[in-house]
Amino acid sequence: QVQLVESGGGSVQAGGSLRLSCAASGYTYSRYCMTWFRQAPGKERQGVAAIDTRLVTTYYADSVKGRFTISQDNAKNTVYLQMNSLKPEDSAMYYCAAKPLSTCVGWINGKSFGYWGQGTQVTVSS
């Protein structure tokens, strides 16, 4: 079993920054596709960013390219999402998800992610 705990959410004005963290614990696999998803009230879940922990290859949704950066700290078993130039439309609950022993091919559809965190709220005011 893998446990994921997100932190770092909060309220910020448009143009501001936040850094989300996703700390993993429990059983450790040699490779993951680690991702961030978000869901706003009344909207479908949206893939935000992903990282292949073996290749350290990163992927982004078009809506966040150039503003968000996903990274990992293997020593801390933690994945980060640095969010800059935040917009009101970035407001959502942000979830970390993990797919063990997998590449990130097709990550954005959110399928086959066996482990999810509880979420952290991000609110961006205009």
Image (spheres, rainbow, N blue to C red):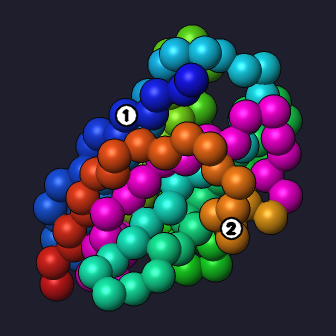
* Local crowd size for mark 2, using a 10 Å CA cut-off: few (<14), some (14–19), many (≥20): some
Which of pointers 2 and 1 lies earlier in the amino acid sequence?
1
The residue located at (42%, 54%) in the rendering is 95
In the image, 16 versus 7, the foreground residue is: 7
Q: Secondary structure at mark 1?
A: strand
Q: Amino acid at mark 1?
A: Val
Q: Is residue 117 above or below residue 41?
A: above
Q: Amino acid at mark 2?
A: Ile
Q: Is residue 81 magenta?
A: no
In the image, 55 versus 41, the foreground residue is: 41
Q: Which residue is mark 2?
A: 108
Q: Which segment did they paint magenta?
A: 85-105
* Residue 71 place in picture, x, y as percent: 59, 39
Left of 32 or right of it: where is 116? left
The residue located at (26%, 62%) in the rendering is 122
Q: Is residue 88 magenta?
A: yes
Q: Is residue 17 above or below residue 96?
A: below
* Residue 7 place in picture, x, y as percent: 29, 39
Residue 93 appears in view: yes
Q: Is residue 26 above or below residue 47?
A: above
Q: Is residue 110 above or below residue 115?
A: below
Q: Are marks 2 and 1 in contact (CB under 8 Å)?
A: no
Residue 56 appears in view: no
In the image, 1 versus 11, the foreground residue is: 1
**Which quarter of the figure is the N terminus placed in?**
top right
Question: Could you say which disc has been placed on residue 5 in the image?
Answer: 1
